Amino acid sequence: KLRTSTSLSFTLNSLSNTTALVEVYNANGIKVLSTTKDVFKGDNTIVQNISKLQTGNYILKITIGDIQQTKQLAIMNRP
């Protein structure tokens, strides 16, 4: 049985107390979500509501200062 969720949770490590920029782009490169999260030095668990995203492939982009990381995100069979 597949678990359905309306949130995305991930852990990131920050070198200082700062702000992270969380962005999600659709397959056409259009930004569909953008938010900032306060992060603290060390490991941080980020939870982001993705209930408004439709089934499809996305790119998750996280920026902290000059450091950027991207990950693929797939949303499947949303009821």
Image (cartoon, rainbow, N blue to C red):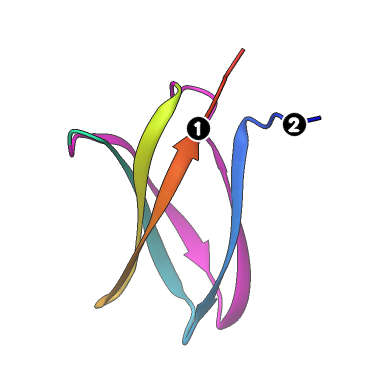
Image quadrant in which the N terminus is located: top right
Of all residues shown, which one is farthest toward the bottom?
Answer: 15
Q: Residue at x 49, y 78 (%)?
A: 17
Image quadrant in which the C terminus is located: top right
Tell me the SS state at disc 1.
Answer: strand
Classed neighbour count for the residue bearing mark 2: other residues with Cα under 10 Å, few (<14), some (14–19), many (≥20): few
41 is within the stretch colored magenta: yes
Of all residues shown, which one is farthest toward the top?
Answer: 79
User: For mark 1, what is the residue?
Assistant: 75
Q: Earlier in the sequence, mark 1 or mark 2?
A: 2
Decide if residue 25 is on the left or right side of residue 2.
left
Image coordinates for residue 51, horizontal then vertical, percent: 54, 25
Decide if residue 35 is on the left or right side of residue 45.
left
Magenta segment: 29-54
The kind of residue tagged 2 is Leu
Q: Which mark is residue 2?
A: 2
Of all residues shown, which one is farthest toward the front?
Answer: 1
Image coordinates for residue 43, horizontal then vertical, percent: 62, 77
Q: Which mark is residue 11?
A: none
Q: Nearer the viewer, residue 40 or 45?
A: 45
Q: Main secondary structure of the magenta part?
A: strand
Tell me the SS state at disc 2.
Answer: loop
Q: Nearer the viewer, residue 23 or 74?
A: 74
Vertical arrangement, residue 58 with respect to residue 41, above or below: above
Q: CA distance from mark 1 to mark 2?
A: 12 Å
When asked about the image quadrant of residue 19, the answer is bottom left
